[in-house]
Structure formats: structure tokens, C-alpha cells
Image (tube, rainbow, N blue to C red):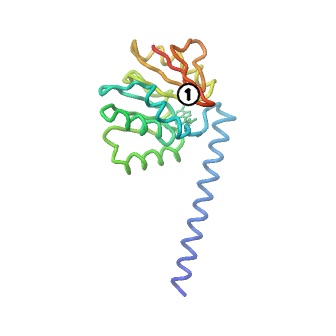
Amino acid sequence: MIYLLEIVLIVLVVIVAGWILFVYFFTWQLVATFLKGEAPFVPTKAGILPKIAEAMKLEGNSILYDLGCGDARVLVACHKLQPQAQYVGFEKNIIPYLWARFRIWAAGLSKNIRVYKKDFFEADLSGATHVFCYLVPKQMEKLDPKLEKELKKGKRVISLRFRLPDKIPQKTISLGNEKLYIYEF
Ligand SMILES: C[S@@+](CC[C@H](N)C(=O)[O-])C[C@H]1O[C@@H](n2cnc3c(N)ncnc32)[C@H](O)[C@@H]1O
């Protein structure tokens, strides 16, 4: 009888915790999108990850930053193609951030992929040789001068879906319904 009560209690705690997490995540997404004008967590479709990794043209000494890395799937996909390079992700939302940390740890990739719970607008991007982003137009507008100021000459910026407003991409790649914009700074 005692065991049964304990099991019921554990199940209840798990259900309540799940609901709290769900409500927190949903509220975060709404606040980020509609009040702050930030990109919500919408992960890149798995089917186009290998194409993105290919388009990145990473080398052994490359350092790729993913601005708003979500669950780190882009970084992991790029690492598969170029395991010698270094990868850095910034993510504000605690749930995808924790999922990214778990994914990287479980795959044994902590040496090459580091993820920070941080606003990328407050991060120094000067260490990047490559930058990936999948954001929203308002953030792209704000990001453009930051990239211009902090990236060294000849660095590669790849944006999924949204363009940098004041720059002409060096190349545009169509991936089904999506577009990948490639810039050389
Ligand atoms: C559209 S998702 C893309 C996730 C991932 N890059 C991918 O392609 O799968 C955008 C992510 O950026 C994060 N984000 C938005 N603004 C941010 C900011 N200023 N600093 C850090 N992360 C941010 C969101 O929480 C969300 O997880």
C-alpha cells in the first residue's frame, strides 16, 4: 500500500513538473516572439542539416559560432562533417540550452562544442571564422552592424531564411522551401 502511494506520488510530481516546464517554455516563446521581437525556438529541419554543414565550408582550424543555437543540432551536424574544427553556441532559452548541453555531453563532444546560456548580442564575436544564424528580420537588422564591427575580414556568415538587410549575399542556396544566404565579410 505504501509503495503504491509512493508510485502515485512520483507520477504526480513528474506530471506537474512536465506541465510547469511546458507552460514556462510556451510563455517564453510568446514573450520572445511578440514582446521582444526575438526568434522563438524553431529548430532547423533535420533534412537540410547536411546541406547547411556542406555550405559552411569549414576547415580544421575553423571556429563556428551559432547565434541562438537552440538544441545545438547545427553545431553537431557541422561537427560530423568537420570534427577538427571548434564550435560555439549561444542560447538564451533555458530549455533548448539544457537540451543542447545534454546532447553534446551524451555524444561525447564537449571538447569541441561549447554552448553558453547567453544573449549573443552581449557576446564578443571576434573569435569566429564562421557564423550561422536562423533568427528573425528585426534581429538581422541589429546583427548586421555588430558583425561588421567584430568579424575580421574574409569571414563567412550563413543565415537561414532571413537576409541581412543592407548586404547582398555572395551566394543564395535553395533548400526546398528554405533559403540559405551566404555572406563574406
Ligand atoms: C529559430 S531558432 C534556431 C535554433 C538553431 N540555430 C537551429 O537552427 O536549429 C532561434 C533560437 O535563437 C534563440 N535566440 C533568439 N534570440 C537570442 C539572443 N539574443 N541570444 C541568444 N539566443 C537567442 C532562441 O531562443 C531560439 O532557440
Q: Splitting the image into four quadrants, where does ligand 1 fall?
A: top right
Question: Closer to the camera, 112 or 118?
Answer: 112
Q: Amino acid at mark 1?
A: Leu
> Is 13 on the left or on the right of 84, as rendered?
right
Give the SS element for disc 1.
strand
Q: Residue at x 59, y 12 (%)?
A: 166
Q: Residue at x 54, y 77 (%)?
A: 7
Q: Position of residue 87 (x, y in %)?
A: 38, 33
How many badges with numbers are in the image?
1
Dot 1 beta carbon under 8 Å from ligand 1: yes
Check disc 1: other Cα within 10 Å, few if <14, some if 14-19, many if 20+.
many
43 w.r.t. 66: above or below: below
Quadrant for residue 140, please give it. Answer: top right
33 w.r.t. 150: above or below: below
82 w.r.t. 152: above or below: below
Question: Closer to the camera, 117 or 54?
Answer: 54
> Is 36 on the left or on the right of 169, as rendered?
right
Report the quarter where the C terminus lies: top left
Q: Position of residue 161 (x, y in %)?
A: 60, 27
Quadrant for residue 11, please give it. Answer: bottom right
Quadrant for residue 42, please give it. Answer: top right
127 w.r.t. 17: above or below: above
Report the quarter where the N terminus lies: bottom right
Residue tagged 1? 160
**Residue at the far right in the pictured view:** 34
